[in-house]
Image (cartoon, helix red, strand yellow):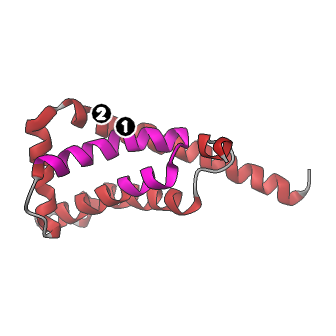
């Protein structure tokens, strides 16, 4: 195998590890939110107030929980990866705005920022060779 081929293989393995690791960890946040039901979704949805959206908190809370659970699962599987990762990025942007809008420190917002950056990288790069997306091409 050429040096370029080895480098590409390592990149694809790295993406696989990143997708599965981040996807699984994000699911630990998202699944309890999905299971929390409408009362929790409505509470989560109030975070959109910090980005100027003050209607339908139940809908937006459900979408956030869905992004953190199903979106994370799809990223881990490498299925519809760019769309799924982007849904997590948007959710983390709102979470960041919520933390900062409540006057919390950058340290409190850092988890959402870090996760958002990592999922943004996946959205840009794509799933890599070891994914369902690659098999479908």
Residue at 43% from the left image edge and 62% from the top image edge: 117
Residue 48 locus on image (x, y percent): 16, 60
Is 22 part of what is drawn in magenta? no
Disc 1 designates what residue? Answer: 27
Magenta range is 58-87
Tell me if label 1 and label 2 are in contact, CB under 8 Å: yes
Q: Which residue lies furthest to the right in this view?
A: 1
Label 2: few (<14), some or many (≥20) within 10 Å?
A: some
Residue at 62% from the left image edge and 42% from the top image edge: 131
Predominant secondary structure, magenta span: helix
Disc 2 designates what residue? Answer: 31
- The secondary structure type at the circle numbered 2 is helix
Using the image as rendered, state which of residue 84 and residue 25 is in the foreground: 84
How far apart are the alpha carbons under marks 1 and 2? Answer: 6 Å
Q: Residue furthest front?
A: 137
In this picture, residue 48 sits left or right of residue 82: left
- The secondary structure type at the circle numbered 1 is helix
Q: Residue furthest top?
A: 35
């Amino acid at each position: 195998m050429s040096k370029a081929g080895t480098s590409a293989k390592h990149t694809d393995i790295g993406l696989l590890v990143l997708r599965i690791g981040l996807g699984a960890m994000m699911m630990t946040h998202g699944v309890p939110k999905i299971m929390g039901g409408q009362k929790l979704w409505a509470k989560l949805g109030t975070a959109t107030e910090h980005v100027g959206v003050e209607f339908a908190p139940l809908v937006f809370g459900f979408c956030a929980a869905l992004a953190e659970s199903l979106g994370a699962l799809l990223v881990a599987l490498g299925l519809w990866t760019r769309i799924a990762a982007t849904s997590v990025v948007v959710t983390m942007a709102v979470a960041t705005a919520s933390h900062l809008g409540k006057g919390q420190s950058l340290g409190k917002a850092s988890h959402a920022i870090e996760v958002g950056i990592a999922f943004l990288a996946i959205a840009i790069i794509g799933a890599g060779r070891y994914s369902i997306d690659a098999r479908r091409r």
